Image (cartoon, grey):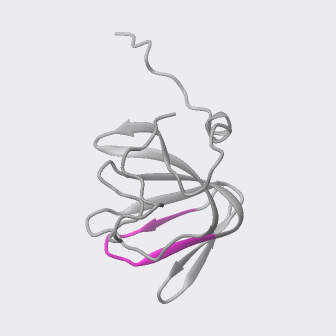
Amino acid sequence: MKDNTIEKVKLEEKFGLINDHWNPRIVGELNGQQVKLAKFLGPFEWHHHEHEDEFFLVVKGSFKMELRDKTITLNPGEFLIVPRGVEHRPVADQEAEVLMFEPATTINTGNLPQSERTRTNLETL
């Protein structure tokens, strides 16, 4: 059976629709997981996710994932999985385009109280 709703996603095109930072957009969903895109610039807050692992893949630019015991630099084509419960802080000295893969229940600010950076109702591109 043919399904006409199946279409490829062009990352460059989708990133072109994003004009802000630290505001993830949904570009796909599968098996209770979401594929999200965001542009990073500057430091985010230290936080962790009690129940969700997070996958970060750099598409363009680079960023550092600060952990309490080390810092890992990610460049285009490199990814990192942050296990649930691990405190982390992404920092981008220059704008980075990042693809994230995580459970649909994941809130970007994790365990922190809600703030102006908290995103609970994500836009789908």
Whether 87 is among the magenta residues is yes
- For the N terminus, the quadrant is top left
Residue 74 visible to an observer of this rendering: no
The structure residue drawn at horizontal position 64% and vertical position 42%, both measured from the top left corner, is 15
Residue 12 visible to an observer of this rendering: yes
Task: Tally the numbered discs.
Answer: 0
Report whether 65 appears left or right of 122.
right
Q: Main secondary structure of the magenta part?
A: strand
Report whether 118 appears left or right of 37.
left
Question: What stretch of residues is rendered in magenta?
Answer: 79-91
Residue 104: x, y in percent?
Answer: 32, 48
The structure residue drawn at horizontal position 66% and vertical position 34%, both measured from the top left corner, is 13
Residue 63: x, y in percent?
Answer: 64, 68
Q: Quadrant of residue 78?
A: bottom right
Report the residue that reaches farthest toward the front. 116
Residue 58, compared with residue 70, is above or below; it is above
Report the residue that reaches farthest toward the top. 1
Residue 4: x, y in percent?
Answer: 44, 12
Residue 110, compared with residue 123, is above or below; it is below
Q: Quadrant of residue 52?
A: bottom left
Residue 104, compared with residue 77, is above or below; it is above
Residue 94: x, y in percent?
Answer: 73, 65
Q: Nearer the viewer, residue 110 or 115?
A: 115
Q: Nearer the viewer, residue 123 or 10?
A: 123
The structure residue drawn at horizontal position 54% and vertical position 27%, both measured from the top left corner, is 8
Report the residue that reaches farthest toward the bottom. 69
The structure residue drawn at horizontal position 34% and vertical position 38%, both measured from the top left corner, is 30
Whether 9 is among the magenta residues is no
Residue 49, compared with residue 58, is above or below; it is below
